[in-house]
Image (cartoon, grey):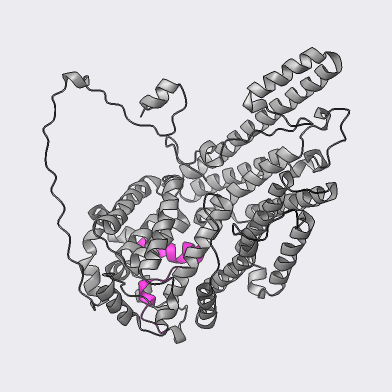
Amino acid sequence: MTTCRRCHRLKKTCSTPVALSKGPAKRLQARPTRTVLQQPTPEPTPAPGLCGQQISRELKHHISDSLQELSIELKQELFDEFLIGMRPSYAFLTLETEFEKDAQTYSSAPDESLSSFTECNSRTPFTAAAILLVSLHRRISLQKSVAAEWLASVSKALIIDGHKSFDLLQSILLVTTYYPYHMLRSPQLHTLIHLAQSLAVDLNLANYTSHIGMPSRIRSDIGAALFGVVHGRSSAIAEHRATLGLYYLQAMYAITLRRLEFPRWSTRLDYACEYIQQHGNDSSDIHAVGILQALKVASVYLVPDGIHPSDSLPIRAYVRCFTTDMSRFRQMLPPRLKDDCVFAQELLTIEIALYDLAIAALESTPHTSGETYEAISATHNCLIAFVDKLLAYPLESYALMNSITLGSELSQMFEVFMKLHRIGNLDSNSHNAEQSPPIWTMADVPPSQQFSAVADRIAERLGDVFLDERARFPTVDCYRFAVYPIQVRQFKKKFDEQFATAGNAARGQQVAAQTDPVMNRSLQDMSKSMPELQMQDGGMFTSPLPALDDLLQWGYIGEGTGWP
């Protein structure tokens, strides 16, 4: 792979490497003959009212044949590993074998059919393929090929065949929650979320009040007759879980990756939470409803037209409002959730997003020095609490985490830490003598809680995860965790170099101002012509660092990939 022609001409780093042709020049090549592509023959849509076995036989061709090359023993092993270790992280998934249970008598006790991959694959082939993809986290090379085949099968089913079913929706939600950043890019993540939203609308899950109490078989017949949608087998609790899962994914990725708009809360979600509270007995259901209720509280502030700091709402009043709401929410939590580490980390992620709005308002909203100090100190305390929660997990649990717990939330923590470093000057000596000292600097923070020390702790912990994985599984490739600490240290090094350059330039301006006014003006002109050394009054570094997705290239050795 080489640099594309456009980036080569511009002499810049290529973000989309392409393979250049090594053959003869175009003028020496024979002109290929034109061939008329025949339109693919539309495949027949299963008739309305088919049972689950018949629908699965009709749609079996959507799954790539190469997935079937894996031995049944390996598939069953991966399926068992998912049920035992990874399924608690995917609270919004309902397996096909649970659809036959009545919602009023729903129980989390496993039955014989629940442990069979063959049974799951015969009824829900897309979900079964997604489970294989997620379970191959310790076989990166094989997971890479399975991920490409899964994407191809989903694209063919949706775009070419026009297939829409609840099985396909659950498969997309499962892969989106796990999302292998070491193989796929962020734009693909956004595409999957938009596809899941479209499927939810097509399956009439967004307006659930129109078929409350209607059996899934009748809903499937009506959808196939009116809209040509093969709903497939499902249950009421499964559809409520999928609806909440879609909102959860969009909301969490919106506040962590900051490339999506925070979704609005609706009465449909209230009804889904109430239904799961009444009929769901699994601990994952309690966790799911709890985090959705927390997102409901935060949605008042995080939506684009929500309650934000402004001229009429000071920063201190804004912080007091949402901290009071979150404190009341914590008091109403059941004891099981209060002791849940993952739930506590998710709450801290939401609070960091709320504090981040106050930090962003410091540049545009009138505020006092006391408000600035309170907002920055509280944000920094949340960041340190988040890091402590993340590093408190056992080593063996990191490999089973989804992309939100280990990936996007960590990305948010780094981004907010950088913002605090921009506001608080790293070196108080860079301020001019005529100016008042900075209100809040990172020098006021203990050395163990500054960015460099925190990055070292995270890199050391991820290095221990790699050593533990290699010791427990010596025959599999664990390179994904070998790259994590390397990239964190590279990011820390680049971060420190840029801020050190900014501090040196600020001190040079201060010395020049005291000695030679002409030299001072030349240094100021030089700083204006160099974006990476731009300064505000007082010498604070203001030029943004590269986006975390562009700087951190995670993955196993030899592959260029994205965060985490």
Name above or below for residue 218 compared with residue 382: below
Q: Is residue 526 left or right of residue 371?
A: left
For the stretch drawn in magenta, the main secondary structure is helix
Q: Provide residue 294's location: percent of width, then percent of height.
A: 62, 67
Q: Quadrant of the N terminus?
A: top left
Taking the view exactly as shown, the residue that stands out farthest to the front is 312
The answer to whether residue 400 is magenta is: no
The answer to whether residue 89 is magenta is: yes
Q: Which residues are magenta?
A: 76-102
Name above or below for residue 293 compared with residue 212: above
Residue at 32% x, 30% y is 19
Residue 318 position by quadrant = bottom right
Q: Provide residue 131's location: percent of width, then percent of height.
A: 38, 60
Front residue of this view, candidates 124 and 264: 264
Residue 531 position by quadrant = top right
Residue 473 visible to an observer of this rendering: yes
- Across the whole image, how many numbered discs are drawn on residues? 0
Residue at 17% x, 18% y is 28
Residue 135 visible to an observer of this rendering: no
Q: Provide residue 63's location: percent of width, then percent of height.
A: 26, 58
